[in-house]
Amino acid sequence: MTFGVRLERVRAGYGQGDVLHDVSLDVAAGESLALLGANGAGKTTLARLLIGLVRPSAGRVTVGDWDVSGRRPDELARRVGYVFQHADHQLFARTVRDDVAFGPRCLGLPGDGVAAALEELGLSRVAGAHPYDLPAPARKLVTLAGVLAMGAGVLVLDEPTAGFDHESRELVVAALRRRIESGVTAVVVSHDLAFVAEAAERIVVMREGAIATDRRARDMLRDEDALHALGLGPPPAAALGLRLALSGSPVRIAECVAALRGARWTAPAV
Amino acid sequence: MIGYAAGRSPLHRAHPYTPLAAASAVLLLAFAVSTPGAVGVVVLAAVALALLGDATGAIVRPMLVLVLPTWALLLVLHGILGGDPHLVLGPVTLSEPGVRRALVLGGRVTAIVIAFLTALATVSPPRLVEAMTARGVPFGRIFLLVSSLTLVPRMRARAVQILDAQQSRGLRIGGSAAARVRALVPLVLPLVLGALAEVEEQVLALDARGAASGARRTALDPPRDTLGERLVRMALIMAVLMAYAAKFMGRGA
Ligand SMILES: Nc1ncnc2c1ncn2[C@@H]1O[C@H](COP(=O)(O)OP(=O)(O)O)[C@@H](O)[C@H]1O
Ligand SMILES: [Mg+2]
């Protein structure tokens, strides 16, 4: 099952004044969206609305046909898988496998997604280890596996690759891409543009609690001026595509490779 | 809420050492005196400190949580188990020396709790770091002190985050009594495990920043210390010394 996500003129905050001012956003079922923006822009607040941990003070948030305001986070978890920025806030079981199985068990799901999620994220080898015996990035992979195993139709990931090495990031990209291809909706908060390039079709930039930009990822990731304004630059594949003026506007590694294979290459005269 | 609460009271604006010195003086004075009346005076001094720090709102709840059970326990223990003569108060009979003893012990606890909650509420941890750095206190020792001062708020913030995270994994909070008990393990264990992991990472981070090197650090913007405040702290030390002198000269204040 897959669901679209919609925010209609939403205001939300933490008591003293609004953090989000009149935000409207429509994410179609099966779409993958990246949220960018400076620290404090409201990305996490927007993400938390989707799992019911922040409540709108005005406006409406829906996931499929569910209005989130009528539902507790543990109910919304059937539709929305939320990966928190910090892994240490949830791991508690004796083994990695048991921890990954916790979410499916809470929801009364058959545990058949557990082994698959462990395998996808390269955790099968450490499935019997204690989560706290793993280094911090691996603990984060465990929390991600725990959410993937719940099989939600919407995935909300807050800085999923912060602190990751290349290999871990590739595992996350592959797992997320598989979900998106099978129709899962993804909302990813990330400054890791190499990750965003591989995982998102659309980019929304937030500024001071409002949406400042909403563009195709391919256009945004090749717009050096717009990225510089955020203190960022094009990810490697996009930068290479721009420098070499490759056809097809590549932003992903595979696209870049395909464009280079197809290009008629002549060495520049020295 | 135990921990720093922003404000503009004289204690908030004072050099961080002053509220800490005042709280320490209350602690020492509470043990220097041993009659209910004198302990009462120390309690009043602690209350005055809380008023000066505009901290009553911030400390009232944790104070009651810490102090009320102590009072109940002391009154029951000493009032019932203490020796003669006994006081008859309506339906209850209480030992007079026992009640006096309970008043002294309970008063001490009350004064100390009020004073230290006030100090915690009015000393900003970053300012304390600056002040201690300016005095050349080694960074490792500053870190230990400040991490204990901020322990409660940090634990509380972490507890909220754990609650959020486990609910998002489908954990039902509330419901039947059995469900509440079942929910405890996934909520409490990450609190402990996460705190341990954090300590380990902080120790590594400290090592990486050369905390053990002993090199003297420079404070960026040390809080200002005034002559008046130095005099106040001297006076507190004098008061404590005099109280102990009186105690050991056998007059018991
Ligand atoms: N739990 C909270 N309580 C109060 N204010 C908060 C809380 N979380 C975030 N804020 C405030 O809301 C604003 C947006 O924060 P956040 O959504 O976390 O931004 P981002 O994820 O884009 O960095 C910030 O000004 C932040 O200080
Ligand atoms: Mg954030």
Image (cartoon, coloured by chain):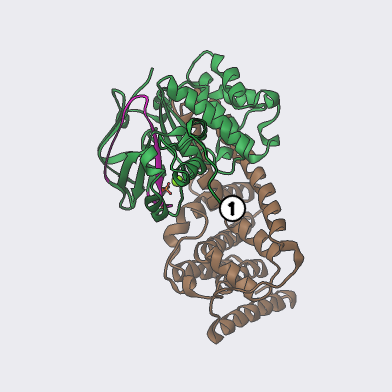
Secondary structure of the residue carrying tag 1 is helix
Decide which of A184, A170 is in the foreground and name it.
Answer: A170
Q: Give the dominant element type of the magenta stretch: helix, strand or loop.
A: strand
Please state the horizontal and vertical placement of residue B181, each as a whole percent of the image: 54, 27
Q: Is residue B176 visible?
A: no
Residue B12 painted magenta: no
* Residue under the point 53% across and 27% down: A174
According to the colouring, which chain is green?
A
According to the colouring, which chain is brown?
B
| Chain under disc 1 | B
Decide which of A182, B241 is in the foreground and name it.
Answer: A182
Instruction: Classify the position of the N terminus of chain A by image quarter.
Output: top left
Region of the chain picked out in magenta, as a range? A22-41
Q: Is residue B59 left or right of residue A138?
A: left
Task: Single out the residue that lies furthest toward the front.
Answer: A269
Question: Which residue position holds label 1?
Answer: B151
Please state the horizontal and vertical placement of residue A261, each as a whole percent of the image: 52, 31
* Residue under the point 74% across and 75% down: B248
Decide which of B1, B205 is in the foreground and name it.
Answer: B205
Please state the horizontal and vertical placement of residue B157, each as a whole percent of the image: 51, 47
Number of labelled discs? 1
